[in-house]
Image (cartoon, rainbow, N blue to C red):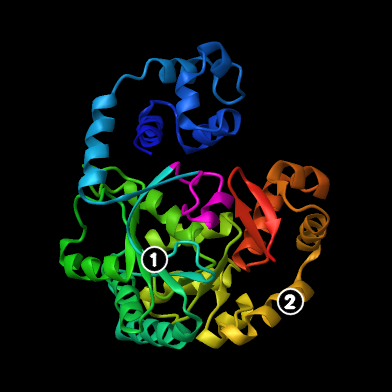
């Protein structure tokens, strides 16, 4: 594991190699170690890499930084989640710019069946507070994972209310796990680690610089089933997150407010421009997303069979293929279903989250018995 982590960390440090290039390389070489051991001529031939990036990989020598980060991870029992790891948030895999490596401290299942992101202004009104608290309280029976950015205002209220209702909640940070910003949320963060967690793509020593927050926001947008904007001005981080979520084809909701209230300008604008659906309560959200209260153990098998009656055309293609063969690699599914890469990825993710298929090592899928 430490050997794998060494090369995985190194890959994130190579100049000119971002998350998109890293995934291209992993498609060809399967592991980070193989990338560094590949010949320069092999690297150069890969579309999107070329001579400059190939040279950067072969010339990388900064393993002292890798050793320092490895020591930090081990000392504080951080969970590194590489792009190919089983515990990596699978919803992020459908985002073209998802992080190559994440750092996680906590116990929440990042791939649980229902995940919502609740975001909003740092300077919330009492109206925003009450709506956030009521929404989460009403969603408690669905056992959702609540994701936000641990900022002042709506973010913190969402985390606090999730804890109050015994829901797991994850804060996505814009800095490394060696610090906490804002420091006023230190106690809240400690509670979240016990009942949720903290997640970031930034290594230790990375400060909460201004440009890190939009980068952080794409994780909030990408790892949730739905993004709910409670209160926001016409500009700011919440609007950026909503735009990112729309780009990822996520369901975006906004709670309307008075047309004269600056804290609702952003929400009203998202609704007006059809970038978000108007949201009034938890029931509307659950109906939109097709959520039902989790079945009892007695009814689980019946519910499993009923799921097959609710599959769309693409999902039925995958299920029918896996009925005929005990298992199949994602590439073969892609070819035989005649779908593009993003479509097959989205389809198998939904089937996996609903418990209809299982992911085996090596991106092989089988039908759940």
The answer to whether residue 295 shows anywhere in this view is: no
**In the rendered image, which quarter contains the C terminus?**
bottom right
Q: Observer-nearest residue: 312 or 206?
A: 312
Q: CA distance from mark 1 to mark 2?
A: 27 Å
Label 1 sits on a secondary structure element that is loop
Left or right of 49 in this view: 319: right
Q: Residue at x 47, y 19 (%)?
A: 37
Judged by its main secondary structure, the magenta piece is loop
Left or right of 271 in this view: 88: left
Q: Which residues are magenta?
A: 84-100
Q: Is residue 143 above or below residue 170?
A: below
The residue that mark 1 highlights is: 108
Q: Earlier in the sequence, mark 1 or mark 2?
A: 1
Within the magenta stretch, is there residue 86?
Answer: yes
In the orientation shown, which residue stands out farthest toward the top? 41
**In the rendered image, which quarter contains the N terminus?**
top left
């Amino acid at each position: 594991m430490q050997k794998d982590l060494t090369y995985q960390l190194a890959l994130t440090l190579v100049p000119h190699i971002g998350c998109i290039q890293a995934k291209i390389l992993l498609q060809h070489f399967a592991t980070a170690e193989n990338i560094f051991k590949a010949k320069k001529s092999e690297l150069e031939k890969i579309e999107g890499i070329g001579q400059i990036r190939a040279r950067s990989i072969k010339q990388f020598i900064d393993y002292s930084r890798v050793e320092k980060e490895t020591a930090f991870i081990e000392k504080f029992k951080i969970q590194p989640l590489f792009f190919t790891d089983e515990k990596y948030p699978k919803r992020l895999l459908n985002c073209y710019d998802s992080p190559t490596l994440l750092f996680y401290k906590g116990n929440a299942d990042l791939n649980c069946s229902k995940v919502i992101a609740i975001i909003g202004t740092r300077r919330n009104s009492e109206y925003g507070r009450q709506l956030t608290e009521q929404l989460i309280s009403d969603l408690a029976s669905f056992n959702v994972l609540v994701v936000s950015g641990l900022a002042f205002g709506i973010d913190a209220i969402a985390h606090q209310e999730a804890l109050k209702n015994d829901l797991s909640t994850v804060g996505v940070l814009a800095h490394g796990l060696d610090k906490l910003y804002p420091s006023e949320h230190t106690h809240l963060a400690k509670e979240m680690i016990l009942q949720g967690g903290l997640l970031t793509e930034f290594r230790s020593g990375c400060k909460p610089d201004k440009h890190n927050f939009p980068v952080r926001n794409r994780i909030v947008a990408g790892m949730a089933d739905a993004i709910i904007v409670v209160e926001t001005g016409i500009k700011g981080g919440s609007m950026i997150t909503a735009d990112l979520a729309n780009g990822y084809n996520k369901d975006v909701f906004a709670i309307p407010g008075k047309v004269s209230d600056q804290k609702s300008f952003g929400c009203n604008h998202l609704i007006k421009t059809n970038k978000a659906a108007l949201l009034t309560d938890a029931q509307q959200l659950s109906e939109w997303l097709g959520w039902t209260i989790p079945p009892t153990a007695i009814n689980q098998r019946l519910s499993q069979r009923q799921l097959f009656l609710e599959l769309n055309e693409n999902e039925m293609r995958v299920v029918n293929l896996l009925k005929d063969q005990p298992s199949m690699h994602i590439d073969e599914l892609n070819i035989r279903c005649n779908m593009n890469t993003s479509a097959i990825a989205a389809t198998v993710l939904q089937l996996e989250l609903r418990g209809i298929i299982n992911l085996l090592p090596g991106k092989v899928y089988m039908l759940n018995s």
